[in-house]
Image (cartoon, helix red, strand yellow):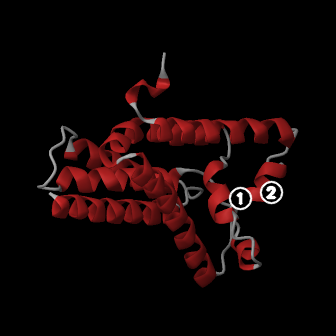
Amino acid sequence: MNFFAEKAPVTYALIAVNAVVFILDFLTSAGNSMGPVKTGGVLFFPLIKQGQFYRLITSMFIHFGFMHILCNMYGLRSLGPALERFIGKNVFLILYLISGLAGNLLTCFIESKTGSYSFSAGASGAVFGLLGAWLVISLSPRVYTNISNRSLIITLGINILYGLANRSINMAAHAGGFAAGAAITYITILMKAKSL
């Protein structure tokens, strides 16, 4: 099977990077839940405050266990290819990275206000950015797609309820990513409409 047949190279490249980091983490952790990959790259506000800003990006590619990466990569695979084709690979990559960054920045902001710090990682902020993008596209009168508003809203609702029920879920990352993805897509649609 040619994974690039769908003309979504960025989506599959992101999946590959996440998979490679996960395997590297597994091979170097030696049974330790916080091996060198996690220790060196997860989101932790006190370390970011000390100048380790790279964690805002690296943490987007690190996952806590197989189910964690499986759920996020399933979301990326489900939402990514069609969105990448619609907005273009460059905008798609920017949207993905900024959504993940926005989720991490919101997490840091909230933790700085509450004084409650925790280790955080995963692609869910970026994936929620894709969900926000699709919701904007599906609601836009300027764009025709066959995507179901109902299915998107149900997916969003399930994720919100699951996040509220599971205290280990970083809801700030989800919210920040979703808002960023929606905003970038709205601006993109407006720019496309003005160029017509």
When asked about the image quadrant of residue 84, the answer is top left
- Say what secondary structure mark 1 lies in: loop
Left or right: 32 in relation to 4 = right
Q: List the residue tagged with mark 2.
A: 39
Q: How many marks?
A: 2
In this rendering, the answer to whether 77 lies above or below 34 is: above
What residue is shown at x 18% (from left), y 54% (from top)? 139
How far apart marks 1 and 2 lie (CA) works out to 6 Å
* Kind of residue sitting beneath label 1: Val
Whether residues under marks 1 and 2 lie with C-beta atoms below 8 angstroms apart, the answer is: yes
Farthest right residue in view: 30
In this rendering, the answer to whether 3 lies above or below 161 is: above
Left or right: 68 in relation to 137 = right
In this rendering, the answer to whether 68 lies above or below 114 is: above
- Say what secondary structure mark 2 lies in: helix
In which quadrant of the rendered image does the C terminus lie? bottom left
The picture places residue 61, in percent across and down from the top left corner, at 63, 49
Q: List the residue tagged with mark 1.
A: 42
What residue is shown at x 55% (from left), y 42% (from top)? 14
Query: Closer to the camera, 182 or 66?
Result: 182
The picture places residue 71, in percent across and down from the top left corner, at 52, 39
What residue is shown at x 77% (from left), y 78% (from top)? 50
From this viewpoint, is residue 10 visible? yes
When asked about the image quadrant of residue 146, the answer is top left
Residue 120, numbered label = none
From this viewpoint, is residue 71 visible? no
